[in-house]
Each structure stands twice: as structure tokens, then as C-alpha cells.
Image (tube, helix red, strand yellow):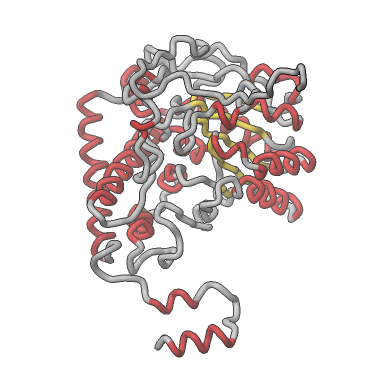
Amino acid sequence: MSDHPRLSLHVPEPEFRPGAKPDFSGVTIPRAGTVRRPPVDTAPEEIRDLAYSIIRVLNRAGEAVGPWADQLSDEALQAGLKTMMKVRAYDTRMQMAQRQGKTSFYMQCTGEEAIACAFQMALEPGDMNFPTYRQQGLLIASGYPLVDMMCQIYSNSRDPMKGRQLPVMYSSKAHGFFSISGNLGTQYPQAVGWAMASAIKGDTCIAAGWIGDGSTAESDFHSALVFASTYKAPVVLNIVNNQWAISTFQGIARGGSGTFAARGHGFGIPALRVDGNDYLAVYAVARWAIERARRNLGPTLIEYVTYRAAAHSTSDDPAAYRPKEESEAWPLGDPVERLKNHLIVKKLWSEERHTQAVAEVEAEVIAAQKEAESYGTLHTGPKASGRDMFVDVFKEMPPHLRRQRQEAGY
């Protein structure tokens, strides 16, 4: 018998489980405006502290303060609020449609709207996002038609994907939105590779990769960081830390790194953490990282600290693994409410105007839904033609597929 103690493993556990009272008072949140803003060309080793803090602009009074503030015009702020409202209304209608059996699956981004919407506003035409399934705000902020998004969800006769993608897995080259993959993590090295290709061609467009906190445990995440750092690819690598993977809290994937942003240090990549529920902070940090990429200064890793207020998907019940009150207790608040309050402080908005805007946005989304449903839903109305399975696969259709198409009557 050995005198050594028996070996054991440490399995991290979330602080709160169903039945417990959430308490985030121990979470360190810097006061808005207190985190410094370094020059864009700062060396990564000189800003290591920014991977452990949280960049914030909006304070609790709704004021924009500090060195990262004052980058958006009044018109841009109002447009940003309306875009987030549209994303939320769209989510609500599509969640309802799934419950009504009009589609098989849906995923909301409730509480995370500021991240995608503000980031997209900092990009330029030609830039390419490599998203996950919770960045619908990128498309909506870029002006992609709601009807087309809904048709993809319904897999109907107007589905741009011709029924080949799981609902919510959109694709639009024209809007800089790379096809979503259900294999989580693959988009990260793809984003780096696309950025490298852009640089090799001498182009001016950059790429943005997106990943959730849970998927950073995938090998694809680390492979992407190796190539991005080695070749100084013009890419912004985004980590949306919404505290929960499908049903696993973020501590499992984070390991002992302290923060997700800190993982960039091992690769020599500048890394920042930002309040993901602060539209102004997200935009400012995105602009900083995007400018860095365009000036051939290499990649930037950004961790957005936020909270997934809704279920992981329509197939998930978060009440089984976290307290129902946890989202309300989350200390960084609601991104829509925070930007609304900021506009009210600036006398650009009011509660009455907000109520009116909610009605306007709701009417727009409902009108789009009615049109989309006129082209069919999952179980009713027109469907995509069976001939679609034979097209857009090969540049030149091989003989055996041509024979199969003829045998099928297409």
C-alpha cells in the first residue's frame, strides 16, 4: 500500500443553484469612467491590467463618463437604442412562433443586445463577422431584412438557406455575416484565416470572430490565437461571457485563468474586458480594436461581461440549473434600459417617446412576420422545392447527381 493520499479532482461549482438567493455583491465592478484608455498602438504587455478590469462608460445616473465616452453622436445613440429594441422584439416574436409550432428551434439573445448591435456599428462594409448563433444583432444592425431572417427560421419557400440550415443559423456575404456552424468553435480559426487572406491580398477589410465562454474550452479557440498572434492577423477576437454555457457555468471553461481575456496574455495578444451591457463602452472598445487591426497592429481579444437572461434555447430549461432570480440580480443591468436612461438624461428621449418607439418597432416586426408566414412556416404553406437539394453544392453538377435529380422528377 502506498503512503500517498488518494488522488482526487476538483470540479468547479457555480455559487448559486436553484433555491439559493443570488448575491453578486462580491463581484468587483469598477466605477464607470475609471478604467484608462491607452493609445491604439500600445504594446500588449503594457495593458495587461485591462484584462482583469471592466471598461465602463455609463454610470448609474445614466451619464457617459471617462476616457472611453463621447464617441457617438446623438443620432447614432438613438439609432442604437432602436436597433436593440428591434432585436428584442424580433426575439420575442420568434420565440412565440416556436412555441406555436411554426418553427422547430429558436435562440434568444435577451440581455446581450448591446454587444452585437454596438460592435456592428463600428465595422465598415466589406468586413466579415464569423458569428455564433446568438449574434442576430449583427444582421439587424447591418440592415439585413427581417423577412429574410424569418423565412430562414421557418424553412419556407423563401428560405435563403433552402432548408439546409438549422433555424437561426443565418448567412449573408453581402452583410458580412459568415454562415453559422453548429460545431461550436470552428468560426474562430475561420475568422483568423479570412483575416490572413485579406492581408495576403492587400485588401483593407478586417474580420471579427465570435465565441461564447463555454466554447473557449475547444481546441479551435487556442489554434486561432496561435495563428492570430504569430501572423498578426487583422482580426478582432470576441468572447461573449454570458456566465452560462448550455447548462454549465463559465468557471468550467475559464479554468484557472481568472478571466477569459487574460488568456490572450499567453499569446502576446492585447486583451480587454468590457461591460457588455453598456452600449457606449462596447462601441468604444470595438472602435479601438478595429482601428488596431486596420493599422496592421495585429489582433485584439475582447471579453464582454454580460448575462444570458433567457434560456440557452427553446430546448433548454434554465430553472433546472440556476435560480430564477439570478438574471434580475445581475449587477450590470439591462442594456436597453441603460441606453434609454442615458438618452433621457441627455434630453433626447422620454418615457413617452420610448412607449411610442416600442409600439413602432413591434408593428414593424409583426408586419415582417406576417409577410414571412405568407411564404410558409415549418408545417403550413409553401415549402422549398425538392430540387433545391441538388443546387448550390457543386460548381458543375456531377453526373450521378444529375441522374438522381432526373429520377426524382426535377
In the rendered structure, the answer to whether residue 129 lies left or right of residue 407 reads right
Image label count: 0
Residue found at x 52% / y 34%: 240
On the image, which quarter does residue 67 sit in?
Answer: top right
On the image, which quarter does residue 344 sit in?
Answer: top left
- Of residue 231 and residue 394, the one placed in the foreground of this image is 394
Observer able to see residue 108:
yes
Q: Is residue 396 above or below residue 320?
A: below
Which quarter of the rendering shows the C terminus? bottom left
- Residue 387 position in % (x across, y down): 42, 79
- Residue 106 position in % (x across, y down): 36, 48
Q: Is residue 95 above or below residue 298?
A: below
- Of residue 68 and residue 190, the one placed in the foreground of this image is 190
Residue found at x 41% / y 49%: 143
Q: Is residue 13 above or below residue 267?
A: above
- Residue 21 position in % (x across, y down): 35, 15
- Residue 199 position in % (x across, y down): 73, 49
Q: Residue furthest front?
A: 1
Observer able to see residue 343:
no
Residue found at x 25% / y 46%: 96
In the rendered structure, the answer to whether residue 282 lies left or right of residue 375 reads right
- Of residue 252 and residue 158, the one placed in the foreground of this image is 252
Residue found at x 43% / y 14%: 24
Which quarter of the rendering shows the N terminus? top right
Q: Residue furthest right?
A: 230
